[in-house]
Image (spheres, helix red, strand yellow):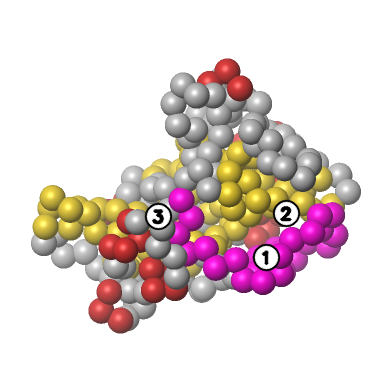
Amino acid sequence: MCGRYSIYESMDHYLRQLSLDLVVINGYDHEPINRYNVAPSTRVEVVRQLDDGLSVDRVKWGWSPFWAKGKRPDPINARAETVMTGKFFKDLWPGGRALAPANGWFEWIPDQHDPKHKQPWYITGVDGAPLYFAALAEVHPGMEPDPCDGFVIVTAAADQGLVDIHDRKPLVLTPDTAREWLDPTTSAERAAEIVREGCRPAASFHWYPVGKAVGNVRNQGAELIMPLGGTNQQAQFEF
């Protein structure tokens, strides 16, 4: 999975689709988020479930344990195959489970007409409903961001036609599975099962090429997710 995604609805929209009968215990902006080009190291909304309700926090995308800080850029993703057993993420697994709501994500592939350059593609749900990326987060309460805070998105192996775009994809959960993932009472064994088997299949997404302006992190706006050619239909590769 490449390091860009979009989240542009209001947080109320993402929470409503989850149908969680829980109170949000901290304040959040009810206006549309309008982030069409979320980049690593920027702060963006994640959802966590605590004992007394839901918490919506703006957290840096990227995280490292304290002993790895400064040795390399903070990873933004955690591979499903190793996140549960590796040393790097042991402080986040399984108690740091969170959701990163989204509308879609971007991947880059070699441009068929100019192999020296890459063409961005946008992947989103066929039904237009919100996407929920399984995430792991460290968040400390307080008015100011803690330098240790951050989150990573869990990624899985791509399947079916998505393999042609990239060999990895975010672990996108259905609303039902997302509720389980958030629930602190969900066992580590069940959470591990969700990591292994809970990702929505490629058939539930469609993808299409978009303009190259998304490559610049300063660019934002709905035009970044508009399909080239003006049609929002799943494109077919012509190899």
The magenta-colored residue range is 10-39
Is 225 magenta? The answer is no
Q: Nearer the viewer, residue 15 or 202?
A: 15
Q: Is residue 179 above or below residue 122?
A: above
Vertical comparison of 105 with 158: above or below: below
Identify whether 181 is placed above or below 114: above
The spot of residue 4 in percent (x, y) is 43, 53
Picture coordinates of residue 82, whole percent (x, y): 50, 29
Task: Work out whether mark 2 precedes mark 1 in sequence or the reverse, and give the earlier one.
Answer: 1
Q: Residues within 10 Å of mark 2 (few under 14, many from 20)?
A: many
Q: Is residue 37 visible?
A: yes
Q: Which residue is mark 1?
A: 11
Do residues under tags 2 and 1 come within 8 Å of each other at their CB atoms?
yes
Residue tagged by mark 3?
217
Please give the residue where the numbered disc 2 appears in the rendered image: 56
Q: Amino acid at mark 1?
A: Met
Instruction: Report the Cα–Cα distance between label 2 and label 1.
Output: 9 Å
Residue pushed farthest top?
67
User: Of the residues under marks 2 and 3, which one precedes in the sequence?
Assistant: 2
